[in-house]
Image (tube, helix red, strand yellow):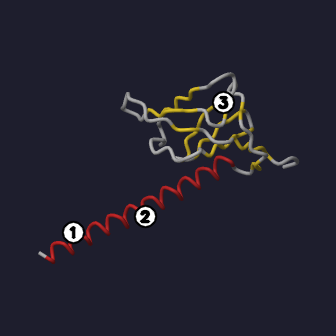
Amino acid sequence: MRFAIITIGAAMLAGCVQNADYQAQRDAQARRELASTLGDRVPGKPQDCINPGFTDGPQIIDSRTLVYRQGARLYRNDLVSECPSLAPLSTVIVEIRGSQLCRNDLFRVVTPGMSIPSGYCRLGKFTPYTRAKGG
């Protein structure tokens, strides 16, 4: 009996290690995608709201980061907290209150193949990224 418990415990520990490795790989992939998306742009002062008109996006980077594109300018949004349902190919449904897309606006996520949206998640501040002048 003792052998079975040790074997099960070892299998559970191996699963945790594999999960940690998988999460580390996903985090590294998200960092590479964000770096590729932002390119040589430099960050500006974070702001509470952006005008959603003429804005493409969001591009989902990971469960904590969205990027909106407005021409050559990009806005990185680091969510208030993790949104576990947020993954590539998901649809983001934002509840805009007023004419601006703002910090603390709520959104839900619809996963491909599903029709029921996730629980609510909240947007964070928008950090503008622009190309360096003269570059």
Name the front one of labels 2 and 1: 1
Measured in 3D between alpha carbons, the distance from the residue under mark 2 to the one under mark 1, in whole angstroms, is 20 Å
Q: Which residue: 44% across, 32% down?
A: 110
* 22 in relation to 55, above or below: below
**Residue that badge 1 annotates:** 8
Rendering coords of residue 79 (x, y %): 59, 44
Position of 5 relative to 73 (above/below): below
Instruction: Please report whichever mark, 3 or 1, sits nearer to the chain's N-terminal start.
Output: 1
Locate residue 50 relative to residue 26 in the image: left or right.
right
In this view, the residue in front, 95 or 26, is 95
Q: In this view, does 70 lie to the left or right of 7?
A: right
Asked whether the residues under the numbered discs 3 and 2 touch, taking CB atoms below 8 Å apart as contact, a structural biologist would say: no
Kind of residue at disc 3? Leu
Query: What amino acid is at disc 1?
Result: Ile
Q: Judging from the image, what secondary structure is the residue with disc 3 in?
A: strand
Q: What element carries label 2?
A: helix
Q: Quadrant of residue 96?
A: top right
Q: Distance between the residues labelled 3 and 2?
A: 36 Å
Q: Name the residue under label 3.
A: 101
Disc 3/disc 1 C-alpha distance (Å) = 49 Å
Find disc 2 in the rendering and name its residue: 21
Q: Which amino acid does label 2 sit on?
A: Asp
Pointer 2 or 1: first along the chain: 1
